[in-house]
Structures are given as C-alpha cells and as structure tokens.
C-alpha cells in the first residue's frame, strides 16, 4: 500500500444483537503507516468493531474495506496481509512458544520460518523461554508471545486489543518501544485498543473515542486535549465516558 493511503475504510457500520446496537453507524479510516488508538469505556463497541474487521462476526449493515477489498467477502486475502493480537487470547499451553509460532508460521506460509521465530522471540525478550511449555510463561510473557505471533507474516495491518494489559510498567514500556520500532521499520498501519491513556498519548498518531457504539470524538492526542480543555487523555476519557 502507498504510505498514507487508506488501509482500512469503514462506512456507517452497524452491529446489532437483538435490539441492542453494539456498534452504531461508525465511519472511520486508518492510513498506511498510521497508528490509531481506539478508546472507550467497557461496552463501547471496541472489541465488536475489531471482530468485524477480522471477519469473525458479520455487520448488520454498513461496509468494511481493507486494502481496497471488501470484508468479509475477501476475508482470506485480507487476513493474509493482516494480523491480530490480544492480551486475552490464550495459545495452546502444552506447546512451547517455538512450537506455537511454528504452527502459526506454517499456516501463513512464512519463508525462513525458523530464523523469523528466533528474531521475534529475541526482539520481545522471551527467547530464554522458547522451549519451555507455554503454561510456564507469565501473563506478560504470553502477551509478548501473542505479539510475536501477530508479526510472523510481516503484516501490513496490525489489530491490537490491549497489547500490554498484563505487563509490568518496565516490560510494557519496552514492548511499546518495540511495537513502535517495528511499525516505523515496516510502515505498518496499526489500530489498537487500550485503557492505558499514557500509552495512547505516546503511541497514537490519532485517537478515536467510541461511546455507546457511536464514534463521538477523533483527532490527534494534542487536538483532543485542546478541544476538551484537559491536561491528559485520561481526563478526556473520563469526560466522554461520563457523557460530557
């Protein structure tokens, strides 16, 4: 994709569960090489939106285009160029990290897989755990393993759901730096959710706020602070979450 060109385009997206609209008329885009933070209180629709971008659930109405291809109709070629990581997704615990990454790498047809796995394990500082059962890893190490998995196929689009939620402050900071470095090296488009407002301020080029399924605010962190006359994104978050 051309740098800056839209990688993700969502138009008037709606997802209803019975009479409840989890996502309600959302329109957004993510450009090539852009990091976009997707924020909102629990139940705002963030995870539902990401699941629709992955083709895991179908929209009630509206459209999704990724790499210029319609989702979910062209799901397979889209997902060959994208990937996903969540702190809340569990990998097979009886397999070692190396074995887990080998399985996913083969599914993606990654060339030079063994070297790629070694590179990612070292980059996320879990190389010493590579051949132990995944159940022996801490929650933070499993989160880093999930991130390594999400980069195996050298994706052009990365979808992240609370990528550092289970990490201590030191490892979370190192992981943010690693994600940012890889994003710059490869020109990735990144859409991610987080409840860590300081993390969003450091990483995101642009921030989208969802509230009760609707997109209620968007802009750079600096623009949002000025618009809401607040000192940090946490204060903006609280104002939006409480209906301000």
Image (tube, rainbow, N blue to C red):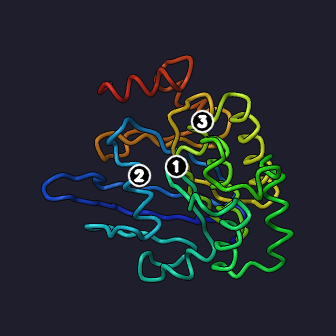
Q: Return the residue at label 2.
A: 47
Relative to 162, say whether 59 is above or below: below
Of 118 and 227, nearer the camera is 118
Tell me how far mark 1 sits from mark 3, CA to CA. Answer: 12 Å
The reply to whether callout 3 and callout 2 are in contact (CB within 8 Å) is no
The residue depicted at 41 percent of the width and 38 percent of the height is 40
Categorize mark 1 by other alpha carbons within 10 Å: few (<14), some (14-19), many (20+).
many
Q: Residue furthest left?
A: 19
Residue 230 picture location, percent across and down: 51, 18
The residue depicted at 13 percent of the width and 55 percent of the height is 19
The residue depicted at 69 percent of the width and 61 percent of the height is 96
Residue 183 picture location, percent across and down: 74, 54
The reply to whether callout 2 and callout 1 are in contact (CB within 8 Å) is yes
Mark 2 and mark 1 lie on one chain; the one further toward the N terminus is 2
Q: Quadrant of the N terminus?
A: bottom right
Can you tell which mark lies on residue 200?
A: 3
Categorize mark 3 by other alpha carbons within 10 Å: few (<14), some (14-19), many (20+).
many
Which of label 3 and label 2 is nearer to you?
Answer: 2
Mark 1 and mark 3 lie on one chain; the one further toward the N terminus is 1
Residue 126 picture location, percent across and down: 77, 49
From the viewer's perspective, tell me whether residue 215 is left or right of residue 86: left
Tell me how far mark 2 sits from mark 1, CA to CA. Answer: 8 Å
From the viewer's perspective, tell me whether residue 26 is left or right of residue 75: left
Q: Return the residue at label 1.
A: 161
Secondary structure beneath dot 1 equals strand
From the viewer's perspective, tell me whether residue 179 is left or right of residue 159: right
Of 4 and 235, nearer the camera is 235
Relative to 54, say whether 229 is above or below: above
Secondary structure beneath dot 3 equals helix
Of 84 and 93, nearer the camera is 93
Secondary structure beneath dot 2 equals helix
């Amino acid at each position: 994709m051309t740098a800056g060109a839209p990688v993700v385009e969502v138009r008037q997206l709606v997802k209803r569960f019975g009479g409840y609209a989890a996502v309600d008329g959302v329109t957004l885009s993510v450009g090539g090489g852009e990091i976009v933070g997707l924020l909102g209180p629990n139940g705002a629709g963030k995870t539902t939106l990401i699941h629709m971008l992955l083709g895991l659930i179908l929209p009630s109405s509206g459209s999704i285009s990724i790499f210029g291809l319609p989702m979910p109709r062209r799901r397979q070629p889209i997902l060959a160029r994208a990937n996903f990581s969540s702190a809340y997704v569990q990998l097979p615990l009886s397999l070692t990290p190396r074995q887990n990454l080998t399985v996913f790498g083969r599914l993606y047809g990654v060339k030079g897989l063994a070297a790629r796995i070694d590179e990612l394990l070292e980059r996320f500082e879990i190389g010493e755990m590579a051949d132990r059962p995944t159940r022996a890893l801490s929650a933070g190490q499993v989160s880093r393993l999930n991130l390594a998995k999400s980069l195996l196929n050298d994706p052009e689009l990365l979808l992240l759901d609370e990528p550092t939620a289970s990490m201590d402050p030191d490892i979370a900071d190192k992981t943010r730096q690693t994600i940012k470095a890889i994003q710059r090296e490869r020109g990735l488009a990144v859409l991610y959710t987080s409840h860590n407002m300081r993390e969003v301020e450091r990483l995101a080029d642009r921030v989208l706020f969802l509230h009760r399924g609707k997109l209620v605010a968007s802009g750079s962190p600096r623009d949002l602070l000025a618009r809401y006359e607040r000192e940090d994104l946490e204060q903006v978050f609280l104002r939006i979450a409480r209906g301000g």
